[in-house]
Amino acid sequence: MENCLFCRIAAGEIPSSKVYEDDRVLAFRDIDPQAPVHVLLIPKQHYANILEADGDTVAYMQQIIRKIAEELGIAESGFRVVINTGEDGQQTVKHLHMHILGGRSMQWPPG
Ligand code: 5GP
Ligand code: ZN
């Protein structure tokens, strides 16, 4: 989709720090990391948000989350997956993406 930031990243028009790629999905480091591991997982096909995506794509992304978590060493310690959706969800990029956050405790407040 034209002028969609994550479509452009998926197409390689905008560089990203890739951690996983296949024909269906791409995972890359968030430009403004909120944790030691902060990866964005996107389908290469454009869906505006989780409500627009088909279940097969979401199920596939779940399998890739497992792979990424194992490769980045956070599968055992645990991690958080966040899917911001719509205005109240504070979704800023209107292309489905899953935040994978790990490498620290998500306890809030810290301590
Ligand atoms: P949202 O707020 O829509 O759930 O998440 C969008 C995320 O995309 C934010 O965490 C933001 O830091 C990240 N982001 C925005 N622009 C870029 C970019 O050009 N490259 C990368 N790698 N991440 C981006
Ligand atoms: Zn897009």
Image (cartoon, rainbow, N blue to C red):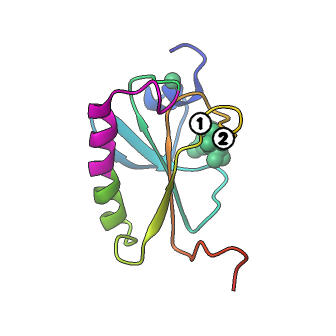
Can residue 24 be seen at all in this image of the molecule?
no
Q: What residue does disc 1 label? A: 85
Q: Can you tell which quarter of the image residue 52 is in? A: top left
Q: Is residue 47 above or below residue 104?
A: above
Q: Secondary structure at mark 1?
A: loop
Magenta part of the chain: 49-64
In the foreground, 54 or 65: 54
Residue visible at 53% across and 44% down?
A: 83
Q: Quadrant of the C terminus?
A: bottom right
The prevailing secondary structure element of the residues shown in magenta is helix
Q: How many marks?
A: 2
Q: Secondary structure at mark 2?
A: loop
Q: For marks 1 and 2, give the CA distance.
A: 5 Å
Does the stretch in magenta take in 4?
A: no
Does the stretch in magenta take in 51?
A: yes
Q: Is residue 80 above or below residue 107?
A: above
Residue visible at 50% across and 39% down?
A: 97
CB contact under 8 Å: marks 1 and 2: yes
Image position, residue 3 (x, y; %):
61, 17
Q: Amino acid at mark 1?
A: Thr
In the foreground, 13 or 8: 8
Residue visible at 55% across and 13% down?
A: 2
Q: Amino acid at mark 2?
A: Gly
In the foreground, 50 or 40: 50
Residue visible at 40% across and 71% down?
A: 74
Determine whether the beta carbon of the residue marked 2 sits less than 8 angstroms from the nearest atom of ligand 1: yes
Q: What residue does disc 2 label? A: 89
